[in-house]
């Protein structure tokens, strides 16, 4: 596996804990998006980006400084995978919308975006993170479906590992 880093933004600690799980399972480095700079981006071939979702489907606050750093970096030739945390019961109409914001920021960057996940098995009303019947990354509802989190992470990692 090429050099990989998990970069996350977390307010309550849920997304941070998930980022730590993902990083430990694949032996990747981990970084809070607050500490992101162009040097970090240039050192890694693979970027796994995670955010929680807030308000009306918005990414976690720290990403508002982090996303412009990603967008201004040379991402050509890099591989990017996304994961998002959300609450499908209380915010079913904007489920993991924060993940969509990051996707929209990097999709035309020259990086290869991998890790789309089928909507099958998820209950939600709507999401900007769904394109052509798939989430743009791994959606997790650790609030209401914590018993599914580990198996969803495992399945997703098996899916993306060949591309890392």
Image (cartoon, rainbow, N blue to C red):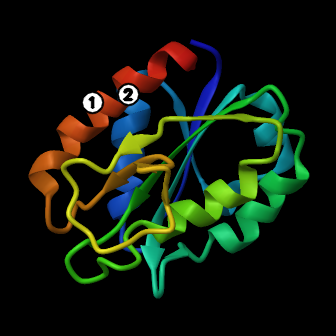
Q: Is residue 8 above or below residue 160?
A: below
Q: CA distance from mark 1 to mark 2?
A: 5 Å
Label 2 sits on residue: 157
Q: Is residue 10 above or below residue 57?
A: above
Classify residue 137 as left or right of residue 35.
left
Q: Nearer the viewer, residue 1 or 161?
A: 161
Mark 2 residue crowding within 10 angstroms, few (<14) / some (14–19) / many (20+) = some
Labels 1 and 2 touching (C-beta < 8 A): yes
Q: Is residue 85 above or below residue 54?
A: above
Q: Outermost residue toward the bottom?
A: 55
Q: Which quarter of the picture shows residue 153?
A: top left
Q: Outermost residue toward the left?
A: 147
Classify residue 46 as left or right of residue 39.
left
Label 1 sits on residue: 154
At mark 1, the secondary structure is helix
Assign the N terminus to one quadrant of the image. top right
Q: Looking at the image, how many numbered discs can be counted on the residues?
A: 2
Mark 1 residue crowding within 10 angstroms, few (<14) / some (14–19) / many (20+) = few
In the rendered image, residue 21, in percent from the top left (x then y), is placed at: 33, 39
Residue drawn at the location 47% of the way across and 46% of the way down: 137
Residue drawn at the location 20% of the way across and 68% of the way down: 143
In the rendered image, residue 20, in percent from the top left (x then y), is placed at: 39, 43
In the rendered image, residue 17, in percent from the top left (x then y), is placed at: 34, 52
At mark 2, the secondary structure is helix
Assign the C terminus to one quadrant of the image. top right
Classify residue 118 as left or right of residue 131.
left
Residue drawn at the location 48% of the way across and 78% of the way down: 57
- Labelled disc at residue 72: none
Residue drawn at the location 43% of the way across and 69% of the way down: 127
Q: Is residue 69 above or below residue 4?
A: below
In the rendered image, residue 102, in percent from the top left (x then y), is placed at: 63, 59
């Amino acid at each position: 596996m090429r050099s990989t880093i998990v970069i996350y933004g977390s307010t309550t600690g849920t997304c941070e804990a998930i980022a730590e799980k993902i990083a430990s399972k694949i032996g990747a480095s981990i970084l809070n998006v607050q500490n992101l700079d162009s040097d970090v981006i240039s050192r890694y071939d693979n970027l796994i980006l995670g955010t929680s979702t807030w308000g009306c489907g918005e990414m976690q606050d720290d990403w508002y400084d982090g996303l412009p750093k990603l967008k201004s970096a040379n991402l050509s030739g890099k591989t990017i995978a996304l994961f998002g945390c959300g609450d499908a019961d209380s915010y079913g109409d904007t489920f993991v919308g924060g993940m969509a914001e990051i996707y929209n920021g990097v999709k035309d960057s020259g990086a290869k975006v991998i890790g789309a996940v089928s909507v099958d098995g998820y209950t939600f009303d709507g999401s900007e993170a769904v394109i052509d019947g798939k989430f743009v990354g791994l959606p997790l509802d650790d609030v209401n479906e914590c018993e599914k989190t580990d198996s969803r992470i495992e399945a997703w990692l098996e899916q993306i590992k060949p591309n890392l």
